[in-house]
Amino acid sequence: MDHPAFSQLLQEDCDRSHLVPLLQRIQQLEGYISEQSVRQIARLLKISENHIYGVASFYSQFRFHKPGKHHLKVCLGTACHVQGGAHLAREIQKQLNLRSGETTPDGSIDYEEVACLGCCAQAAVVVIDGVIHAKMTPDRLLKKIDQLRGQQSTFSEAETQSLLAPTSA
Amino acid sequence: MTTLRMTINGRVLEAERGETILQTARRYGFYIPTLCDYAHLTPHGSCRLCIVEVEGSPKTPAACTTPVEEGMVVRTHSPRLQALRSEILRLLLSEHPVSCLVCPEQEHCDECMITLRKSGVTTGCRSCPKDGLCELQELVVRIGLSGQSPYPVFYRGYAVEKGDPFFDRDYNLCILCGRCLRVCEELHFATTLTYVERGSRTLVGTAFGRNHVEAGCSFCGACVEVCPTGALIEKYSKWDGRPDGEVKAICPLCSLNCELRLLTKKGQVINSLPTDLLGKGPLCLAGRFGIPELVNHPQRLKTPLLRETSGWRQLTWEEAAQVLADKLFNCSPENFGLLVSESNSNEDLYVAQKFARVVMRTHQVSTLAAQRYGEGFPQVVELMRHSVSLQALSRARTVLCVGLDVRYLQAPVEYQLVQAYRRRTRLVMLHSRPHSLSLFADVELLATPGQEALLLNELLHLVRGRPTSGKRMSKEQLSALAQAAKLLSASPVVVLVGPEALESVKNKALLGAVQALAKALHALVIPLPAQGNLSGALMMGAFPYLLPGGYSLDQEEQRQKVIGRWSTPLPAISADPLFWRQGGRLRVLMTIGENPPKGLPDSVFVVMQHLYPPPDQKVDLLLPLAAFSETSASWIDYAGVMHVGNAVAPPSGEALPAWQMLCQIARSMGARGFDFNNAEEVRAEIARLVSGFVEGGTVDRFELAVSCDHKLRQPQPGAEPEYLSYPLSHWIQGWQWLLTQR
Ligand code: SF4
Ligand code: SF4
Ligand code: FES
Ligand code: FES
């Protein structure tokens, strides 16, 4: 059992009740829950991988793919919708073939659709790597995306952590 | 259990504390509609159809999850409940693609498909494979739902999962009752099914969307059996509709001899189910899904066939019997041999050995068990002599499994082990490749192939408080051994020995080590042979050196008994135990359910009675054999218990059980003692010679022993389980596919 997340838990007597804390710890360390990790948890707690996956997929905080370098959120809340948020989403689906929760094949961008970010005055809102971009249009968005794909992550270490930290369930 | 008083629908009655309202109501014959509830599965409370009114509470609790209370006043039906239930059902149906369940044109639609109302996403309720068997459909009728639903149809649009063998999964029809995942979790160590995602996207699935083979499914089919809708359905009988018959039979595919409920339609077996899913456990994939394919296979032999230079000539039974009688009449005892299979019924085996001994005056009758088990055969038989029922597991504190892989074969054993495990029985496993239960073993002893005996002997040292030699073992093995020895000190201990160990190349040493260890631990040993009636073959005396009852040929008392019953002396000349190998003296070889050995000289006249044609060996006369489901037949299981199965369907063509064919020939050759009219009469005669031979009884195996030293052994490529000398995958397509996935 070589997984770093296990080291401290191994001291105690592990049982099924450790499943969610374990998943959180792994997500924190690696940013996602890999097949490998699920296999190791199964071995540690003696439960089936299917069961673990079922529990993990219940919480939206867990993800099963390696996070992309950049994080893109498009708001589909009411105000943003009125201001063309749905066009943005459609454009992304058309141009990049991405649906909410997916990552581009090259691992450069995570895409997520959200409902209201609390800054409706600036609708339609897009958030790129934690930075709000107001009054977005499809053209500008696609340009931004091109830029993102051509450059390195603008994430700071702290940002990564805050993005990956589990929101309390 | 204490009782309490409560009222249901105005009737004052006694309920048991701890029961749910649903359980009490059912006991008193009140009907409450349910959907997610299933027999002995833990209540789920998800469908909400079982809601009831409880006086003093504004809510309508679910009867299946609410415990009864003293003085409780419950109403199961009222206009409010009726309205609520109808609404719940409408909501369920709004996601169910077969919305014409409630279509007003339903009846006429059946006749002439007139309606235009059928929504675009549906193809009509009559095109669901579960039509007529669906619990949802039944509820619509019982609750009396009709008219157009106010809700729009929401079609989830999942692709139907057809990629795994044996059953299809159409989750568009799923109502998320959770029966399948609950039953899977109940029956297995590791569940295959789980809810994935939540909310409106909830779906039944596996980790990372893997297929069932990868997800660890054992294809026990339990989920398919309990699913109330058409979401999970057997591929084989998918479009067969409602079966018209159901008969109990015994599975001949391995020594567990599970009871089967065979479902028939128009005289054909279409499906096979366990008799007590949550009691005795599920079937394995062969018993659950393979049976219809095995017995209805298009290659089944239908009439006797005689080989001629121009090809096969079809014969009537009379002609065939004549051809055979002529051949046999001129055949002297040492020139005749009769090969039977360990998958044959007791009736066939008993009459076969009697035929060889009385009619042909020879002891040259045998199965190929000696070849299969090689030099460890006497040990296998010795273990079988002392075997007990798996019920012994209920008292065990530690179980040692040797060479036992129960994912695909002998799967019902897993449920027994699961139950023991839940009672905190410790599991020690010894095998040479990790398998589905490795994860759950308290100690897993991984041997390199052939090293098992060594590890067991070292274990014996440790158990006796002596140090191990430590030689030829890895560090991991040494520490596992120490742990295993510790666990095994908690008695009672039960040792299960699987086919892998019984048939292993070094089985003599391995099984000897098992015996020694079991002796030191005062443990019970349960061997689980892969063949369906090895016990029967031994007890019927279908070996050159055994008499009926499992006595050796020279046991005087039994000899006299047999001679008395048959009114003929036994043949004097001793037989060659491996007669089928020495082509030299053999002139006529008969085989029943067995493919003739390869390389027989052309001069040998080969007669074969079988379900299927031979692969490529030379056969002169082919006779069709009735399948186990086509005749009343009995079997003796791994624990010596006798089971009787019934005839379920008419035989394929003119197929006959072997005992009937042999009686016909014996009579035409003028022999006496072959006037059995039916299988019961054969069993009655067997019971005179084999004590304990009654349905459900355990036969006496006190004298059972095999002493000859068989050095002969067939190579075992992959040790695939066999039925009537064919690998099971030869006839069961899904299994073929599984093997390619390994
Ligand atoms: S697949 Fe069948 S048993 Fe499983 S949840 Fe759906 S409807 Fe229920
Ligand atoms: S076939 Fe058996 S093991 Fe496979 S998913 Fe269904 S219940 Fe589980
Ligand atoms: S609707 Fe988009 S920020 Fe509120
Ligand atoms: S049967 Fe009670 S909620 Fe489904």
Image (cartoon, helix red, strand yellow):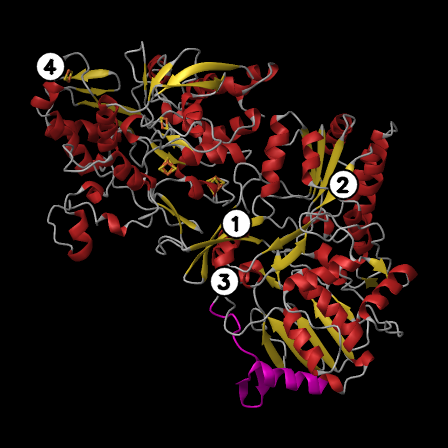
- In the picture shown, does residue B550 fall above or below A21? below
Number of numbered labels in the structure image:
4
Q: Secondary structure at mark 2?
A: strand
> What mark, if any, has residue B394 been given in the picture?
none
Q: Label 4 to label 1, Cα distance in Å?
A: 61 Å
Three-letter code, disc 4: Gln
Location of residue B211 (image quadrant): top left
Q: Residue furthest top?
A: B56
The Cα–Cα distance between marks 4 and 3, rounded to whole angstroms, is: 75 Å
Please tell me how crowded label 2 is: few (under 14), some (14-19), or many (20+) other residues with Cα within 10 Å. Answer: many
Q: Residue at x 63, y 54 (%)?
A: B644
Q: Residue B525's mark?
A: 2
Residue A164, picture quadrant:
top left
Query: In this figure, which residue is indicated by the disc labeled 4?
Result: A122
Does the image show residue B256? yes
Q: Sequence-wise, which precedes: disc 3 or disc 2? A: 2
